[in-house]
Image (tube, rainbow, N blue to C red):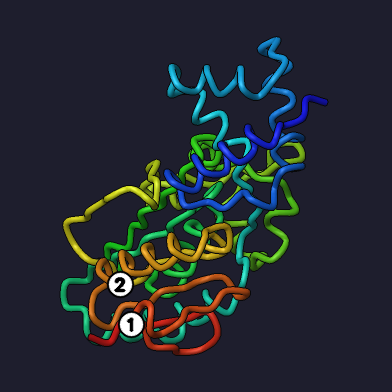
Amino acid sequence: MIQLTDQEFYGLVKFIRMHYGIDLSKKRLLIEARMYSVLYEKHLFSFSQYFEILKHDSSELNTLLNKLTTNHTYFMREPSHFQFLKNTILPEQQKENREHNLRIWSAGCSSGEEAYTAVMVMKDYFGTSSGWDYRILATDISTKALANAQAGVYAEESLKDLPSQWKERYFKKAGSEYVLSDEIKREVILMQLNLMEDFHFQKPFDLIFCRNVMIYFQQAAKSELLQKFYRLLKVGGYLFVGHSETIQHDTAGFRYVEPSIYRKDN
């Protein structure tokens, strides 16, 4: 296996941290393992040769990011968030939101299970002819993950925590896999987005999912992103992070609601 030199490793860590906020400083073996096949296919003998290609071929940057970002998820992951959406957020919206327009962003959506689960929750709550617009924006840096989300084809293991009636209603079995229905897919807008770049949206969000994404960020990048989320939420809007993540109030301004759930109060 081709190994990273110290210079190559620290250069790559610096580049990824600067442009994407992701901290790979403890992932040396992972980088070597995941990138070996790419170097082998290109008949390269060092990472330095590959980095030279990166300078002149932006498509190779997508290959690098697809290889180095982990996208393990499944439907109904961390189910307490979806219970909170159903039992707290949606009743609040039904009472207060006269426009019947619910804006939700799944930031770091991976292969789409999070966003699609949220759509199923809302379809179950509002019914089929509610008059509510609850399409979800789902973004990720990985083009491979987004392509998988667009395809909507999942292994049975990914559906293990879904209610059986949702599995039967929204999926069609195809061999050993399950294909998601267009009824759910059309409610999700997929887009590539680097969370470390400047981005703006026309209207603020009622809810932002960013779960198990910032655990890969250095603290400065995490603080910067939290400030963006705070700015992009409506007053009264919620932020969901991963169950293993916490937010320091003095760095973001969010109010703690319960573990991994925060709110913008002003």
Residue 123's tag is: none
Between 132 and 200, which is closer to the camera in this rendering?
Answer: 200
Q: Position of residue 15 (x, y in %)?
A: 49, 40
Check disc 1 and report the residue beneath it. Answer: 253
Between 173 and 3, which is closer to the camera in this rendering?
Answer: 3
Q: Position of residue 154 (x, y in %)?
A: 65, 45
Q: Quadrant of residue 113?
A: bottom right
Q: Quadrant of residue 224?
A: bottom left
Q: Which sits earlier in the primary sequence, circle 1 or circle 2?
A: 2
Q: Quadrant of residue 99?
A: bottom left
- Looking at numbered disc 2 in the image, what kind of residue is underneath it? Tyr
> Which residue lies most toward the top here?
43
The local crowd at label 1, few if under 14, some if 14 to 19, many if 20 or more residues have their Cα within 10 Å, is: some
What separation in Å lies between label 1 and label 2 (alpha carbons)? 8 Å
253 vs 18: above or below: below
Query: Image point 44% across, 88% down: which residue?
Result: 256
Check disc 2 and report the residue beneath it. Answer: 230
Q: Is label 1 in contact with label 2 (beta carbons under 8 Å)?
A: yes
Direction from residue 87 to residue 13 in the image, left or right: right
Between 214 and 11, which is closer to the camera in this rendering?
Answer: 11
Q: Position of residue 117 (x, y in %)?
A: 52, 62
What kind of element bears circle 2? helix
Query: Image point 32% across, 69% down: which residue?
Result: 227
The local crowd at label 2, few if under 14, some if 14 to 19, many if 20 or more residues have their Cα within 10 Å, is: many
- Looking at numbered disc 1 in the image, what kind of residue is underneath it? Gly
Direction from residue 121 to residue 174 in the image, left or right: right
Q: Position of residue 221 (x, y in %)?
A: 43, 60
